[in-house]
């Protein structure tokens, strides 16, 4: 695993590596902006962290309102990044 990279395990046991671009803690919630690679045009996801029974899980953020707020927040934090919601 490279520095700044996390490995996430899906429910089916498959693993995928992501690069953590930024972490945000807002209103008691933790979010990660992750990318598939460090290339300029790489796809990115916003993940919402939950913890239950000492197990940390991440879910892809799907709430449109929350997504708009976090997209703007991450763009302001990372001045050289432009995020597009698809």
Image (cartoon, rainbow, N blue to C red):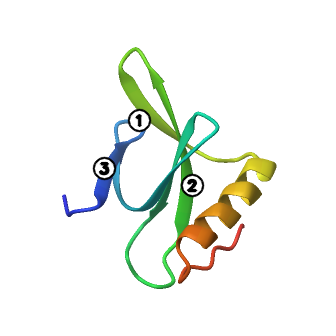
Residue that lies at the very extreme toward the right in this rendered image: 65
Please give the count of numbered marks on the rendered protein.
Answer: 3
| Vertical placement of residue 86 versus 25, above or below | below
Residue mark closest to the camera, 2 vs 1:
2
Instruction: Check disc 1 and report the residue beneath it.
Output: 12
Secondary structure beneath disc 3?
strand
Q: Which residue is depicted at the point 75% across and 45% down? A: 63
Dot label at residue 7: 3
Secondary structure beneath disc 1?
loop
Instruction: Check disc 2 and report the residue beneath it.
Output: 46
Spot occupied by residue 2 in the image (x, y as percentages of width and height): 20, 63
Q: Mark 1 to mark 3: distance in Å? A: 14 Å
Quadrant assignment, res 18 = bottom left
Mark 3 neighbour class, 10 Å CA radius: few under 14, some 14 to 19, many 20 or more: few
Q: Earlier in the sequence, mark 3 or mark 2?
A: 3
| Vertical placement of residue 53 versus 30, above or below | above
Q: Which residue is depicted at the point 42% across and 67% down? A: 36
Given residues 1 and 81, the one toward you in this image is 81
Q: Earlier in the sequence, mark 2 or mark 1?
A: 1
Q: Mark 3 to mark 2: distance in Å? A: 15 Å
Spot occupied by residue 83 in the image (x, y as percentages of width and height): 64, 73
Secondary structure beneath disc 2?
strand
Given residues 22 and 45, the one toward you in this image is 22
Residue that lies at the very extreme toward the top in this rendered image: 53
User: CB of mark 1 within 8 Å of CB of mark 3?
Assistant: no
Mark 2 neighbour class, 10 Å CA radius: few under 14, some 14 to 19, many 20 or more: many
Residue mark closest to the camera, 3 vs 2:
2
Mark 1 neighbour class, 10 Å CA radius: few under 14, some 14 to 19, many 20 or more: few
Spot occupied by residue 71 in the image (x, y as percentages of width and height): 67, 63
Quadrant containing the N terminus is bottom left
Dot label at residue 82: none
């Amino acid at each position: 695993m490279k520095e700044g990279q996390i490995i996430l395990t899906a429910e089916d046991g498959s693993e995928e590596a992501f690069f953590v671009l930024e972490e945000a803690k807002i209103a008691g919630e933790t979010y990660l902006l992750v990318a598939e690679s460090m290339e300029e045009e790489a796809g990115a996801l916003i993940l919402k962290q939950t913890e239950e029974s000492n197990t940390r899980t991440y879910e892809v953020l799907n709430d449109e309102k929350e997504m708009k707020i976090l997209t703007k927040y991450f763009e302001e934090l990372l001045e050289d990044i432009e995020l597009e919601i698809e």
